[in-house]
Image (cartoon, grey):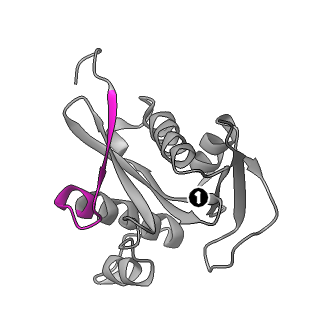
Amino acid sequence: MTARSTWATTAVQPDHPDAVLLLREYMTEMVVRYHRRPARPGEVDAALAEMPSDDLTAPSGLLLLAHLGDDLAGCAGLRWQPGWAELTRVFIRPGQRGAGGGAALLAAVEERARAAGADRIRLDTRHDLVEARALYARHGYAEIPAYSRGPYAEHWFEKRLHA
């Protein structure tokens, strides 16, 4: 990676090999952080089955992969709702964190959501994901009352999109 490396995003199908790899890395980190221990055999597969990403494709959503230069670096997904979009699966690989990838992914999903006619993006996240919550707050996402239910939804955010 050179100092001139830039972030780029591309929409892919959730079953694309790079997407499968990143979604597994994302879910592994979610399992490890939630339980505060290494993932047990089968635990990541069970989590992937419990919270599938196969709807992150047209017409129900999209999945973006992020590259830093030539390196596969992260992902983010959107699920389309009437008039708005739900952000999910935001992940930057540990080796690329701190290089602006979160901001690049948020800018890319916001652009895609605006182009699709969404007036806002919402998301839910867990209490232990403090870095994610800080990222959202830095980029104009405000905490809102709960709009969803789920075993891992503890904080809810929204950002209004302007044309």
Q: Position of residue 110 (x, y in %)?
A: 55, 42
Residue found at x 45% / y 30%: 100
Residue situated in front as seen by the camera: 21 or 32: 21
Q: Is residue 25 magenta?
A: no
> In the displayed structure, would residue 144 be above or below residue 148?
above
Q: Is residue 8 left or right of residue 99?
A: left
Q: Position of residue 62 (x, y in %)?
A: 40, 58
Crowding at dot 1, Cα within 10 Å, few <14 / some 14-19 / many 20+, comes out as many
Specify the amino acid type for callout 1. Answer: Ala
What is the quadrant of residue 85 in the picture? bottom right
Residue situated in front as seen by the camera: 144 or 127: 144
Q: Position of residue 123 (x, y in %)?
A: 63, 59
Residue found at x 31% / y 80%: 45
**On the rendered image, what quadrant is the C terminus found in?**
top right
> In the displayed structure, would residue 78 be above or below residue 28?
above
Residue found at x 25% / y 64%: 20
> In the displayed structure, would residue 33 be above or below residue 47?
above
Residue at the disc numbered 1: 85
Q: Is residue 144 left or right of residue 76?
A: right
The residue segment tinted magenta is 7-20
What is the quadrant of residue 160 in the picture? top right
> In the displayed structure, would residue 97 be above or below residue 150?
above
Q: Position of residue 122 (x, y in %)?
A: 65, 57
**On the rendered image, what quadrant is the N terminus found in?**
top left
Q: Is residue 146 left or right of residue 12?
A: right
